[in-house]
Each structure stands twice: as structure tokens, then as C-alpha cells.
């Protein structure tokens, strides 16, 4: 979990630079370190190499393509290798200029070569290559070095379903930027660190510690706000005997219809929810669901804004059962006036 926790800390403390207009495209090599747990829960790290090309799709985002080769992902006599062809979406809440944080999602085709069965490979040497969908999401920091060089570093959860690949990954890219500079016209965006608590409402899952994360916010030209929160959440399984304390990375985009009293903003929040669980156990992999609740941004007398919120989380677990949790949280971020 250290890769993504470090990413949360970097984003929370990252300065927001104001550089010249951003180039419209970039291309360059990508390298990553991926951490996989074996059947006993021991983590092993592996390296991948590839390349990325991305294009600014707007003032606050990029669309890109990445090809990566994971040559050897096995810690024993088994065979496990991966070639991934992904489409990336980068979201920059304060624009893609200067030094800026971002959230990234990726979906693509994974060519997986893996031993069958995945254990006791010294006795069973059968291998198979399959094509599957893969999914990743996480947080990163972008640094524009002059008009032509861009560096990105991120931590993310990465999964290829129906394989042994459910992992945390640290990824870095250095790109050559080119194209006519784009002058930004974006509305203000903001972000800040958040801390929360999880309370059991139903099902066989509960929180076992505070959640730590980053909350993004972007005003729109209409009546609402686009929000995104990514959390590290320690969990506990109820009535469980082994591997009962998984940790999850919660990815919760949402739409926030808002009212604007004099003291700040009052809003409702609803959206989809993904939970990536890389640790060994019955919950390993991806759970999905939805979230909804209420929150408020309270303007201070200075340059900061305090957010308080409460929302219900619904997760459908790997076995098909449901879990319901109440998450309450507090966040602080640079003050953002109404953008419309």
C-alpha cells in the first residue's frame, strides 16, 4: 500500500504552479514498478517498460494511449507475463500547467500468459495466453520542465480480472511535448487532503481505521460541480477466519448539485464507486457499487475552505454479497469562489 499512500501525501502537499500555456500533445517512455502478493501474502516487485502518447482533450484533461510490457511477474516456477494496451484518461483539476496533481484512469486489452493452474508449476507446466480487459486508477503529479519536457509520476491500483494480477503500481513517464500552445479557459478547480471514518450499516464488512485520501472539485458552467475522492480505506470482514483485514483503494467520482448560501456551499453528492483490494483473501480484486450523501464547503476568513460530508457507500463484493458503510469526512483545500 505504500505506493498509493505516498501518492496521497504528495498530492496533499503539492504546490500548484502557474506556467506558460500548455502544449497540446506529448510522447515518451514509461517505466513502472508493480507489487504483487503471492499465495502466502508476501509482496514481490517487478518492473515494466513501455511508451505513452497523450493529447489535451480540454483545459482539464488528456486522453492517451500506453503500451507496456511486463516480461516476468512470477516469483516461482510458474509463468506469468503481460502485455497491456491501454487508453488513459488524465483529469487535472487545476489545469495541466506548471506543477499540478492529477487523477488517472486506464482501461485496455491485456494479453496474459499464465500457468494453469497458477500454483505447483514444477509439476504442471501447462501455460495459456488469453486476452482480457484490464483496469487501473490512481493519483499522480505532473511537472512541466520548460515548454518541451513533461514528467509524470503516479501511484495506482491495477487489475486484470480472471488472472493473478491485482496489484499496486508506481508508474513514471518522461515525455517530449509538442504542438501549438493551448491557452487555458478553465473554471477554478481545487483539491486538498481528506480524513474520514467508516461505520458499519449492513453486510459483512466494516472499517478498522480512518480513511486517508485526496478530494478534487471543479465547478461547471451549469448548476453543479464535478467531484472526485480517492481514499485508502482499512477494512475488516465480519465472521471471518483468515485474511480478514483487507485494505482498499476507493475511487468515487460524483456529481454535486449545489446551493450557495453566504457562508459557502451546500450540496448533495452521488456517483459510482470502485474499490480495489490487492491483498490476499476472498475479497482480492475489484468491488463495485455506488455512493450518495450530503456535504458543505465552509468559507473561512482566510484563503482556505473547510469541507464536511457524510455519505453512504454500497459495495457489491466478489462473492456477490453486499456491504453498506457510512463514511464521514473532513477536508481542507484552497478557497474557491463560485465559478458561475
Image (cartoon, grey):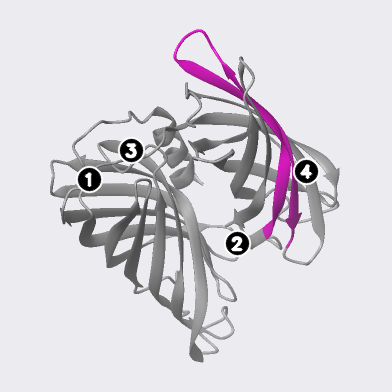
Please tell me whether residue 313 belongs to the stretch shown in magenta: yes
Secondary structure at numbered mark 4 = strand
Give the foreground label among 4 and 1: 1
Tell me the tag on residue 325.
4
Tell me the tag on residue 22.
1
Precedes in sequence: disc 1 or disc 2: 1
Precedes in sequence: disc 3 or disc 4: 3
List the residue tagged with mark 3.
100
- Closer-to-camera residue (106/10): 106
Secondary structure at numbered mark 3 = strand
**Neighbours of disc 3 within 10 Å: few (<14), some (14-19), many (20+):** many
- The residue range painted magenta reads 288-317
Along the horizontal axis of the image, is 99 left or right of 210? left
**Neighbours of disc 2 within 10 Å: few (<14), some (14-19), many (20+):** few
* Alpha-carbon span between mark 2 and mark 4: 29 Å
Q: Where is residue 273 in the image (x, y as percent from the top left)?
A: 65, 52
- Closer-to-camera residue (295/323): 295
Amino acid at each position: 500500500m505504500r505506493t498509493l499512500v505516498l501518492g496521497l501525501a504528495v498530492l496533499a502537499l503539492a504546490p500548484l504552479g502557474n506556467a506558460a500555456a500548455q502544449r497540446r500533445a506529448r510522447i515518451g517512455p514509461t517505466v513502472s514498478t508493480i507489487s504483487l502478493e503471492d499465495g502466502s501474502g508476501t509482496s514481490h516487485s517487478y518492473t515494466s517498460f513501455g511508451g505513452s502518447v497523450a493529447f489535451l482533450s480540454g483545459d482539464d484533461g488528456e486522453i492517451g494511449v500506453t503500451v507496456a510490457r511486463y516480461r516476468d511477474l512470477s516469483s516461482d516456477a510458474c509463468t506469468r507475463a503481460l502485455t497491456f494496451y491501454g487508453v488513459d484518461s488524465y483529469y487535472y483539476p487545476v489545469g495541466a500547467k506548471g506543477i499540478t496533481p492529477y487523477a488517472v484512469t486506464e482501461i485496455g486489452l491485456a494479453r496474459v500468459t499464465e500457468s494453469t493452474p497458477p500454483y505447483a508449476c514444477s509439476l504442471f507446466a501447462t501455460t495459456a495466453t488469453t486476452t482480457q480487459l484490464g483496469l487501473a486508477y490512481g493519483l499522480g503529479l505532473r511537472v512541466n520542465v520548460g515548454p518541451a519536457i513533461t514528467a509524470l509520476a503516479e501511484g495506482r491500483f491495477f487489475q486484470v480480472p480472471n488472472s493473478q494480477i491485482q496489484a499496486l503500481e508506481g508508474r513514471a513517464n518522461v515525455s517530449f511535448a509538442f504542438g501549438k500552445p493551448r491557452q487555458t479557459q478553465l473554471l477554478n478547480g481545487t483539491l486538498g487532503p481528506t480524513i474520514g471514518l467508516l461505520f458499519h450499516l449492513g453486510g459483512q464488512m466494516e472499517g478498522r481505521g480512518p480513511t486517508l485520501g485526496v478530494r478534487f472539485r471543479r465547478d461547471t458552467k451549469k448548476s453543479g460541480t464535478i467531484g472526485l475522492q480517492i481514499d485508502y480505506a482499512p477494512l475488516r470482514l465480519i465472521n471471518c477466519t483468515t485474511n480478514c483485514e483487507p485494505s482498499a483503494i476507493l475511487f468515487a467520482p460524483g456529481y454535486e448539485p449545489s446551493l450557495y448560501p453566504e457562508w459557502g456551499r451546500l450540496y448533495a453528492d452521488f456517483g459510482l464507486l470502485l474499490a480495489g483490494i490487492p491483498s490476499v483473501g476472498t475479497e482480492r480484486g475489484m468491488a463495485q457499487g455506488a455512493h450518495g450523501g450530503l456535504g458543505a464547503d465552509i468559507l473561512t476568513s482566510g484563503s482556505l475552505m473547510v469541507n464536511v460530508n457524510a455519505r453512504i457507500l454500497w459495495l457489491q463484493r466478489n462473492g456477490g454479497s453486499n456491504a453498506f458503510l457510512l463514511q464521514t469526512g473532513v477536508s481542507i483545500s484552497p478557497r474557491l469562489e463560485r465559478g458561475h
